[in-house]
Image (cartoon, grey):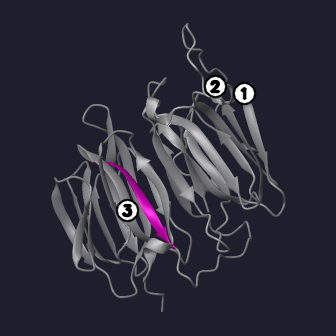
Amino acid sequence: MPEQILEPFRRGFRLGPVGGDSGDDVYESFEKRINGIDLYGDDSVVYSIRLHLDGDVRRIGPEGGRSKGHLSFAADEYIDRIDGRMGDHWGGNYVIQGLIIRTNKGNRLETGDLNGGRPFYYHIYPGTQIQGFWARGGAGLVALGAYLYVPPSFRPQSTDYDLQKHTLGPSGGQGGSPDSPYEDVKNRGRLKKVTIFADGSHPLPPPPLPQLPPDYWLTVDKIVGIKMEYVWGDSIRYGSESKDRRSLDLDSDDFLIKVAGRYGHPFAKREVVHSLNLLTHKGKKLEVSITEKDYYNLRDFSYDFTWSDKKPIIYGLWGRGAELLDSIGVVI
């Protein structure tokens, strides 16, 4: 029988969020076991997830919409997969348009528009559990992240790179292509190199020059693309290339354990990725970021698998892009 959840807050890791960069109201729940859920929405937008916890009901998202049903969990039941759609709603405001929540028992609950917008995924690693959410709200549920719980008995699967892949994200804007990353990483073996392409120009403020941060000239304004090289097959690139490129080479026994960054829409007509930070099992880092997060009003995202000796392997990165890198996610 699957292990019951006892201490999720001690092993909770943030995933995402997916969705827009607006919304000021923040909602969060991760410290108690989920006993059931309700979904509230209408035909075109999701408003909230209501979590039935031990002795409490927690609303993740703003008021609004209609109840789309209730799902009670058995003692050994938990959320193991989320699918959804995000897109433009109410004149340029990106929101979560549709949502399907599934459990390890095969039960599901859904609401909203499941055909419009762009897809996103929280297809988690086998043996782990979604045990909480964090979100931003405004005119609907704007952005949705998840907390991953790792039971003490968890052990990752083999490092066989041809196993079924599990998709998370993407975080960022709605532009670019493709919609699904699975074929991109299928049967390519180990990830051996990642290259991030930047715009290569950090504008100098008008005179008189202020006191600039020490890392000013090491930062960039936005990411234009990212390229992955595997041991087999051609390289995969999302977005475009530029002369300003920074690379991370992975040893044969190394792999990514954390991908984080920021997204938003300064200096661009749409939401795009502006910062990326990669961390490997052996401690190698690749960081490409702008200087002042608060100044640019960017939103953080993270796909964090840094727990001690229980590391699911990030097989690769996937995203959407054209002339810029619109969004980024991971495949585990």
Which quarter of the figure is the C terminus placed in?
A: bottom right
- Local crowd size for mark 3, using a 10 Å CA cut-off: few (<14), some (14–19), many (≥20): many
Identify the amino acid type marked 3: Phe
Q: Secondary structure at mark 1?
A: loop
Determine which quarter of the picture holds residue 161: bottom right
**Image side of residue 205 versus residue 188, left or right:** left
Residue on which the image places disc 2: 199
Q: Are marks 3 and 1 in contact (CB under 8 Å)?
A: no
**Image side of residue 232 versus residue 82, left or right:** right
Magenta stretch in the rendered image? 141-149
Q: Position of residue 157 (x, y in %)?
A: 67, 76
Q: Earlier in the sequence, mark 2 or mark 1?
A: 2
Q: Earlier in the sequence, mark 3 or mark 2?
A: 3
- Residue displayed at 37% across by 72% down: 31
Give the CA separation, mark 2 to mark 1.
7 Å
Q: Which label sits on residue 133? A: 3
Give the CA separation, mark 3 to mark 2.
34 Å
Q: Position of residue 160 (x, y in %)?
A: 74, 71
Q: Secondary structure at mark 2?
A: loop
Q: Does 259 lie within the magenta span? A: no
- Local crowd size for mark 2, using a 10 Å CA cut-off: few (<14), some (14–19), many (≥20): some
Q: Which label sits on residue 244? A: 1
In the image, farthest residue toward the right: 252
